[in-house]
Amino acid sequence: MNESSQSLPSTDARDRSPSTAEEGFVKELNRLIGVVKIHEENNRLVIESAENFIRSISGLSAEEDQVTIQFIRGQVFLQNQKIPYRRDMEPILHKLCDYFSKRGIGGLRFYTTISEASTRGLLTFARLLNQAGNEKNGLTWFARKLTDERIAWVEIVHEPLAREDDPDSETLDLAAIAKKTYVQVLASVKEVARKVRAQERAGIGKTLRMAQNMVDLMMADASMFKALSTIRIYDDYTFSHSVNVAILSMCLGRYIGLSKNSLERLGLCGLLHDIGKVEVPEEILNKPGKLSAGEFEEMKKHALNSVRLIVKIQASRDRKARLLLPPFEHHLKYDLTGYPQTDRKKPITLFGRILTIADVYDAVTSPRVYRPTILSPDRALGMMLKGAGKDFDPILIKVFINMLGVYPIGTLLKLDTDEMALVKETREEADRPRVLLLIPNGRGGFDPGEKVNLDARDPKSGEYLRNIIQSYHPSAFNIQTADFMF
Ligand SMILES: [Fe+2]
Ligand SMILES: [Fe+2]
C-alpha cells in the first residue's frame, strides 16, 4: 500500500462515521432540552428522551461516577476532552454553547445516581434550565431551584478550564489538558493491549478518539505537543514508548503537511505499533543487558504479532487494513534489511518510514535501567543521521532533525556561564533554543529558574550572552524532564 495512492477523501471521513458515545450524550442533552419545550411530561417522546439521556450517561461513565460537560469559549468539553467539530455536530455544539452562555452556566456535572432519578425529575431539571434563560441571573436562579427541587444528581460546574482574566491561564490549562491527555492515551493503549492479550473484545473507538484529541492538541500548540514526548513512564515503558512514538510521528507528519485524517491514522499506528510486545515474555522484554540470539529472535516476533493483534481488534475491515502495514514495517529499515524478512521488494510506506524514525529516536533517548550510557537528544540525532539511506529515509531523517531543532526539547545543556539549562522550546530549524535555567537546590537537585533565549545578545558587544558548551541527557543528572516542562 502506497501512502500517496491513498487519495484523501473529498469530505472528512469523520463526518460520515457513526456518533461517538460523547456525541450521543451531547445530542441527548440537546434533545431533552428541546423536547420539554413542546411536549407535556406524559408524552411518549418526552419519556423516551429522558430514558435515552440517562442511558447516554451510563454509556460514558463506565470508569467514573460522573460525567462533566463544560462550555468554554465556544467549545464543548466532556470529561475535560474537547468534542471535535464534525459537520453534523457543529450546529448542536454552537447552539448549546450559546444556550449555556446565555444562562451564565459554565458546565454541568451529572452523577451516575441519575439512573435512579424519575422521568419527572429529569423533566423538571430540563424545564428549569429553559426557564433560567428568562431570569436576570440565570445561574443563581437555576442553582437555587435545583436545591429547592432536591435534585442532587446534577451540579453546576463553576470552575472553567481557563480564566479569562489571566493571560497565562490558557497556556497553563492547555498544558494541564495535554498532560491529562497523555495519561488517558496511555491508559487506553494499555487497555486495548490487556484485552487483546486476554482475548477479550477490544474496540478501537476510544483509542481513535484519543488520536483525534492528540491531533487537536497538536493543532492548538505544536511545540507543547512535542514536549509531551519527553514524558516517560518507566513502569509502563512499552506503552509510554508507544505514546511517544505516536506523538513524534504525528509531529513529523504535520511538518510534512499531512491532512488531519492522515495524522489521526498515523497516531493510531504509533499507538499500536508495539502492541505485539504483549506476547513477548516479560523476562526478555525487561532483560537487563544484551539479549541472546534466541531471545532476540523471540523479540523480533513482536512486529508480526502487532499485525495479528490489530486484526483482532473490533473495527471495520477498512480501518484495520489501513493500520496494518506501518506496524509491520517499523523494524524493516529503509533498505529492507531489518525484520520481519519477506520476499517483497517494495519500498516501505511513508507511515512505515515515519514510524521507524520516531521509534528509534524515542528508544535511544529513553533511559532504561540496563543502559549504562544514554545519548543526549542532539547526539541521538547525530547518530541516526549516519543511518540515512540505510536505516532511515534519507530525506525524512533530515526533515525530522530540522523539525526537532539542533538541540531538541528536553536536552540538558551546560552553558559557558557555568549554568545548566533545559531546552524548553525550539523553533524549527533554529540552533539556539529557548531554555529554562536550572538552579542547583543544594540537595543534589535543581529548581526551575528563569526562561531565557539563547539567541539573546549583549546590546553593546553584539556577542551572544550564553553559549552552549556541552549537551547531556537529563537522566545523567537525575532530572525528570517532564517535571520542568509543564
Ligand atoms: Fe518495535
Ligand atoms: Fe517501538
Image (tube, rainbow, N blue to C red):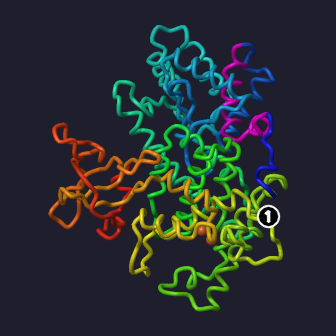
Quadrant including the N terminus:
bottom right
Residue 376, compared with residue 62, is above or below; it is below
Residue 448, compared with residue 171, is above or below; it is below
Determine the image quadrant of residue 342.
bottom right
Residue located at (54% from left, 8% from top): 134
Residue 432, compared with residue 345, is above or below; it is above
Q: Is residue 444 magenta?
A: no
Question: x, y percentage for residue 258?
Answer: 66, 44
The answer to whether residue 323 is left or right of residue 184 is: right
The residue furthest front is 461
The answer to whether residue 15 is left or right of residue 273 is: right
Q: How many marks?
A: 1
> Nearest the camera: 397 or 162?
397
Magenta span dominant secondary structure: helix
Residue located at (57% from left, 80% from top): 285
Residue located at (66% from left, 64% from top): 273
Q: Secondary structure at mark 1?
A: helix
Find the magenta span and give its range: 11-37
Tell which quarter ligand 2 is in.
bottom right
Question: x, y percentage for residue 203?
Answer: 73, 56
Label 1 within 8 A of ligand 1 by Cβ:
no
Determine the image quadrant of residue 167.
top left
> Nearest the camera: 252 or 307?
252
Residue 120, compared with residue 344, is above or below; it is above
**Which amino acid type is shown beneath numbered disc 1?**
Val
Residue receiving disc 1? 311
> Nearest the camera: 334 or 210?
334
Question: x, y percentage for residue 225?
Answer: 49, 47
Determine the image quadrant of residue 15.
top right
